[in-house]
Image (cartoon, helix red, strand yellow):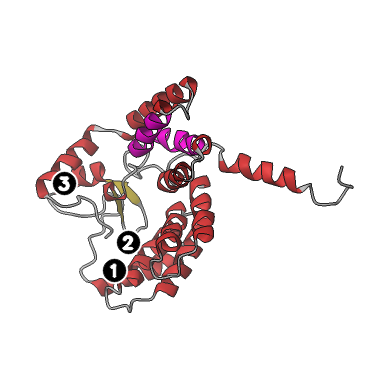
């Protein structure tokens, strides 16, 4: 046994890390208007660069139809009229500690858009700051950068590190990627642990792989039944008539209904 004041044994540290990794994710952020959990696809969310609020597509479409114009349902601000104005808004939000603004600005640097140069180092800096401020999507993007070499050298250890940070913070895509990596490595049981969590968040792709894991004997009856139940419950919580209307409208327009403004 370690003496008082000494660090705990390394095995205990690993066990604690595993417990944190496979713990239940935090509650999903809610739409500022309808108070339902935000949809999983980012294309069904709308971030306002004026007030920094994120709103679901259902509420955006409902407000647009009511007022016959496109504006933020929360602050009534309009879409930025130019790339320069958009960057100015994001910069102001960033100075207020808005992590989502940092994620949006990082995307501008990634593309070299709105009058800014393409700068992958600046992109990573902004994403890291956003992740430290609690934005799981920032860590997920860093995971993608290091897994696929998007503006940085491929580093799978770093990719896994950032995916884990994102997954613990509640990003279903990072959780799925961790499960997929375990699956591809032949670690079916570890994959199931991850996929049960992301399926329980409402992720359809995770549920499909859980079905395959069950068919191949990597998931037990109880695990598969729990995944089915929690996936269904999450989907119900994420749905609304307005959101279904927004999806139909987006399909009709043949373009994503929601954009960052």
In this rendering, the answer to whether 107 lies above or below 221 is below
Camera-nearest label, 1 or 3? 3
Choose top left, top right, bottom left or bottom right for residue 205: top left
Residue extending farthest right: 3
Residue 85, position as x, y percentages in the image: 27, 72
Residue extending farthest left: 252
**Quarter of the image with the C terminus in it:** bottom left
Q: Is residue 133 visible?
A: no
Give the mark nearest the N terminus, 1 or 3: 1
Q: Is residue 130 visible?
A: yes
Residue 54, position as x, y percentages in the image: 34, 51
Give the mark nearest the N terminus, 1 or 2: 2
Instruction: Give the crowd class for mark 2: few <14, some 14-19, many >=20 residues within 10 Å.
Output: many
Range of magenta residues: 191-213
Q: Main secondary structure of the magenta part?
A: helix
Distance from Cα at disc 3 to Cα at disc 2: 21 Å
In contact (CB < 8 Å): disc 3 and disc 2: no
In this rendering, the answer to whether 211 lies above or below 126 is above
In contact (CB < 8 Å): disc 1 and disc 2: yes
Check residue 131 in the rendering and tell me which mark sits there, or answer none.
Answer: none
Give the mark nearest the N terminus, 3 or 2: 2
Choose top left, top right, bottom left or bottom right for residue 260: bottom left
Q: Residue at left 44%, top 45%?
A: 184
Q: Which residue is mark 3?
A: 250
Element under label 1? helix
Q: Which residue is mark 1?
A: 86
Describe residue 137's horizontal placement relative to residue 254 as left or right: right
Q: Which residue is mark 2?
A: 49
Instruction: Give the crowd class for mark 1: few <14, some 14-19, many >=20 residues within 10 Å.
Output: many
Residue 144, position as x, y percentages in the image: 41, 58
Q: Residue at left 39%, top 42%?
A: 30
Observer-nearest residue: 70 or 41? 41
């Amino acid at each position: 046994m370690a003496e008082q004041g000494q660090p705990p044994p390394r095995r205990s540290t690993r066990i604690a890390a595993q417990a944190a990794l496979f713990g239940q994710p935090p509650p999903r952020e809610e739409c500022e208007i309808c108070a339902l959990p935000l949809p999983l696809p980012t294309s069904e969310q709308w971030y306002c660069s004026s007030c920094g609020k994120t709103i679901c597509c259902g509420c955006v479409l409902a407000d647009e139809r009511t007022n016959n114009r496109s504006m933020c349902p929360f602050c009534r601000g309009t879409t930025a009229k130019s790339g320069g104005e958009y960057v100015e808004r994001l910069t102001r939000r960033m100075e207020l500690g808005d992590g989502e603004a940092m994620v949006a600005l990082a995307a501008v640097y990634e593309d070299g858009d709105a009058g800014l140069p393409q700068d992958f180092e600046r992109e990573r800096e902004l994403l890291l700051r956003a992740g430290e401020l609690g934005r799981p999507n920032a860590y997920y993007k860093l995971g993608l950068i290091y897994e696929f070499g998007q503006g940085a050298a491929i580093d799978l250890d770093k990719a896994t590190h950032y995916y884990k940070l994102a997954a613990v913070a509640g990003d279903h895509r990072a959780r799925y990627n961790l499960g997929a990596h375990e699956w591809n490595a032949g670690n079916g049981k570890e994959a199931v642990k991850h996929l049960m969590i992301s399926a329980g968040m409402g992720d359809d792709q995770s549920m499909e792989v859980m079905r395959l894991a069950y068919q191949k004997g990597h998931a037990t009856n109880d695990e598969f039944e729990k995944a089915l139940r929690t996936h269904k419950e999450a989907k119900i919580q994420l749905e609304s008539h307005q959101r279904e209307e927004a999806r139909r409208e987006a399909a009709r327009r043949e373009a994503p209904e929601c954009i960052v403004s």
